[in-house]
Image (spheres, helix red, strand yellow):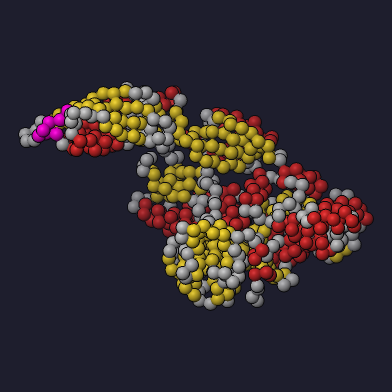
């Protein structure tokens, strides 16, 4: 492979809802562009992108993968991303390092939940976008209906550059609005039939207007001539795509490939080069800065993905954001302040690699044999302390308690999962002391199944998962006071500590406040810290559920001591017992963690989803329309959400999705609190 300058590079992330044919499109683009001699197929397990055994078995992309096309003097890096919500971490990583994206939409189903989600990921990153309408030859496909659906859901900037030719419901080819050319189902050029002339004229006028609106001079030329020259069109369309006011639509088939060349020809025209991309937020020491994508700048690269390769071990995928490197060199992992030796880097198509002689700004490459680098790290030249702002990955929505099936494998399990979590930021392993369990969180049940399957394969450790305990908190609802005298006489020196303590409720989230109002030395000053320690120890296990006590002010206001028998230990014990006694009289209340859910569902499933949320003690806070979808916002107790991902799939025929965020702690209803108290008592027995 020859070397390319930054201006001749383009990186495209292919995104969309699951099962719309993204991987098949990538295989078709790779084949049509001459990147491979054989057309890959997802169905027969020969895809160049879904090349792992687990992806082939499940017929779904479970991670992002690369493909390289050399087309008309340009090198186009394709990143095939997962469409399943369980693996959106890889999708977001691919979008972040792209110059632009191709959103794949099914020619039958149109805009789906995953379409909106991945569209939103691209919008947050301000990525220029092209759209590919796939499978336009199916019996129930309707390009006009899907186009209207996209314009309603995604905006009026959705305008066709190519459209399918249909005669009596049969697919006859694809027309290019800009060139006025057409190809038949075998990809051979054909004349544009008269039946397509009206659509051709309509779509061309829409594109001319979109181009003219980007510049006053272009608008003047349009008003004067009622059209634009080819040069003016190219300039206006490129500006409109870069500004995300235009989303050019292409159409065709991935199987067999039809229409891909029109898309490949347009990528360099519509998508800006790496050097035209925006500056990236970064820091250098305490200073914030914007890193310009300059080929002559310092070498800075972002790690956006990592995985274990059968032959090379752990490899990381990087995007060069500034500068470049050549040959073997020492670099720095700026995120971890660690040195790395960079000598094994490759350009990848599927699992096939090509040795890279050098990397320039905009390059995407795989790097092997790094010691301490993982996803979201910044690599930089020696002496350069620039750290790129990290990729913002979605919060996990599915959490389980986990343990090895065989005792003694805890450390091995923890080490294996920690390595996986470093590669996949949407996988989070925690040792939660508050509930006394190890938990694993991810984007869904399938996500964790795949991760645990990989764990078994790499380490031999089998695990079992179960419902995690809930991290309840306890608090008080009113003031109360009391005293406790700890007096114990043994053969030698005795123990004596006597305290009066008042408890007061604090606003939610205030935690703990301790104060002393002792006067006259009834409790010597040197014993006050021991009183506080006794209270803090008592707060670790409340009287309702043995949970942590929060939002309490404890005031020691009186007491007595013995000049010989009093000690720190005696006052600590007295304070501990006093706190527990007083809390029982202070209106003890149980608090539970509550999360905010934002559930996106097709309108026809909204009633079932809302009913289910209500049955989970959820409080609906609002509903917003998003095209043909509804976004339901609800506040729901965490205790009611175990395996909610599976329930939502069942309720919505796998067309719903949700995100969640922690809202806070709220009081548990009285009848549920009593049930939890009974469970806590039975565990003690």
Residue at 54 percent across and 41 percent down: it is 660
Picture mark count? 0
Viewer can see residue 176: no
Q: Position of residue 147 (x, y in %)?
A: 78, 47
Q: Position of residue 5 (x, y in %)?
A: 65, 72
Apparent side of residue 516 relative to residue 129 in the rendered image (left or right) = left
Residue at 85 percent across and 65 percent down: it is 189
Does 134 appear above or below 536?
below
Q: Position of residue 551 (x, y in %)?
A: 38, 32
Q: Quick one: 186 or 637, which is closer to the camera?
A: 637
Q: Quadrant of the N terminus?
A: bottom right
Q: Which residues are magenta?
A: 560-566
Q: Quick one: 663 or 143, which is closer to the camera?
A: 663
**Residue 662 sits inside the magenta stretch:** no
Apparent side of residue 70 relative to residue 332 in the rendered image (left or right) = right
Does 425 appear above or below 472?
below
Viewer can see residue 90: yes
Query: What type of secondary structure mainly makes up the magenta span?
Result: loop
Apparent side of residue 118 relative to residue 475 in the rendered image (left or right) = right
Q: Quadrant of residue 415?
A: bottom left
Residue at 40 percent across and 50 percent down: it is 404
Q: Quick one: 507 or 188, which is closer to the camera?
A: 507
């Amino acid at each position: 492979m020859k070397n390319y300058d930054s201006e001749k590079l383009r990186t495209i992330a292919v995104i969309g809802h699951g099962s719309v044919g993204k991987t098949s499109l990538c295989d078709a683009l790779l084949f049509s562009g001459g990147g491979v001699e054989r057309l890959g197929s997802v169905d027969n397990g020969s895809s160049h992108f879904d090349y792992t055994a687990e992806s082939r078995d499940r017929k779904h992309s479970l991670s992002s993968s690369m493909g390289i096309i050399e087309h008309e003097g340009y090198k186009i890096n394709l990143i095939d991303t997962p469409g399943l919500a369980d693996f959106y971490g890889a999708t977001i990583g691919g979008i972040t390092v792209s110059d632009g994206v191709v959103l794949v939409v099914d020619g039958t189903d149109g805009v789906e939940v995953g379409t909106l989600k991945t569209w939103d990921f691209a919008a947050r990153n301000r990525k220029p976008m092209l759209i590919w309408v796939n499978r336009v030859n199916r019996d129930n496909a309707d390009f006009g209906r899907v186009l209207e659906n996209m314009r309603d859901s995604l905006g009026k900037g959705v305008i066709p550059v190519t459209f399918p030719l249909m005669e009596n419901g049969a697919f006859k080819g694809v027309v290019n609005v800009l060139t006025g050319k057409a190809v038949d189902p075998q990809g051979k050029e054909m004349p544009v039939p008269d039946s397509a002339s009206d659509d051709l004229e309509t779509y061309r006028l829409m594109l001319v207007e979109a181009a003219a609106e980007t510049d006053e001079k272009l608008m003047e030329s349009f008003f004067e001539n009622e059209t634009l020259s080819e040069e003016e069109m190219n300039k206006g369309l490129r500006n409109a795509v870069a500004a995300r006011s235009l989303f050019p639509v292409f159409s065709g088939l991935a199987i067999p490939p039809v229409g891909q060349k029109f898309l490949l020809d347009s990528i360099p025209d519509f998508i800006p080069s790496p050097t035209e991309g925006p500056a990236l937020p970064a820091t250098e020491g305490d200073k914030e800065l914007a890193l310009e994508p300059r080929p002559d700048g310092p070498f800075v690269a972002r790690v956006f993905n990592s995985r274990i390769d059968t032959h090379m071990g752990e490899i990381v995928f990087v995007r060069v954001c500034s500068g470049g490197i050549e040959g073997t060199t020492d670099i720095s992992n700026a995120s971890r302040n660690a040195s790395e030796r960079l000598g094994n880097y490759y350009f990848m198509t599927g699992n096939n690699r090509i040795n890279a002689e050098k990397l320039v700004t905009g390059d995407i490459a795989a790097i092997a044999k790094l010691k301490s680098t993982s996803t979201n790290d910044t690599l930089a030249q020696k002496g350069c302390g620039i750290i790129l702002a990290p990729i913002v990955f979605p919060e996990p929505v599915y959490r389980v308690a986990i343990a090895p099936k065989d005792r003694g494998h805890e450390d091995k399990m923890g080490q294996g999962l920690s390595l996986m979590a470093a590669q996949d930021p949407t996988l989070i392993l925690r040792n939660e002391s508050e509930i006394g369990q190890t938990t694993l969180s991810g984007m869904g049940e399938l996500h964790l199944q795949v991760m645990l399957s990989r764990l078994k394969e790499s380490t031999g450790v089998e695990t079992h998962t179960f419902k995690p305990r809930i991290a309840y908190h306890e608090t008080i609802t009113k003031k109360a006071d009391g005293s406790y005298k700890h007096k114990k006489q043994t053969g030698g020196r005795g123990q004596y500590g006597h305290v009066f303590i008042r408890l007061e409720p604090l606003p939610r989230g205030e935690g703990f406040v301790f104060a002393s109002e002792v006067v006259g030395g009834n409790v010597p000053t040197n014993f006050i810290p021991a009183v506080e320690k006794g209270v803090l120890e008592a707060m670790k296990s409340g009287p309702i559920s043995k949970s942590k006590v929060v939002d309490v002010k404890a005031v020691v206001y009186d007491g007595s001591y013995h000049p010989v028998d009093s000690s720190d230990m005696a006052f600590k014990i007295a304070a501990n017992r006093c706190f527990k006694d007083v809390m029982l009289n202070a209106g003890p209340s149980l608090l539970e963690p509550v999360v905010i859910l934002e559930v996106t569902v097709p309108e026809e499933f909204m009633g079932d989803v809302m009913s289910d949320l209500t049955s989970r003690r959820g409080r609906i806070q609002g509903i917003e329309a998003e095209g043909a979808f509804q976004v339901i916002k609800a506040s729901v107790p965490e205790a009611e959400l175990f395996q909610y991902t599976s329930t939502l799939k069942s309720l919505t025929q796998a067309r719903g999705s949700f995100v969640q965020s922690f809202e806070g702690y709220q009081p548990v209803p009285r009848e549920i609190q009593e049930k939890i108290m009974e469970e806590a008592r039975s565990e003690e027995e």
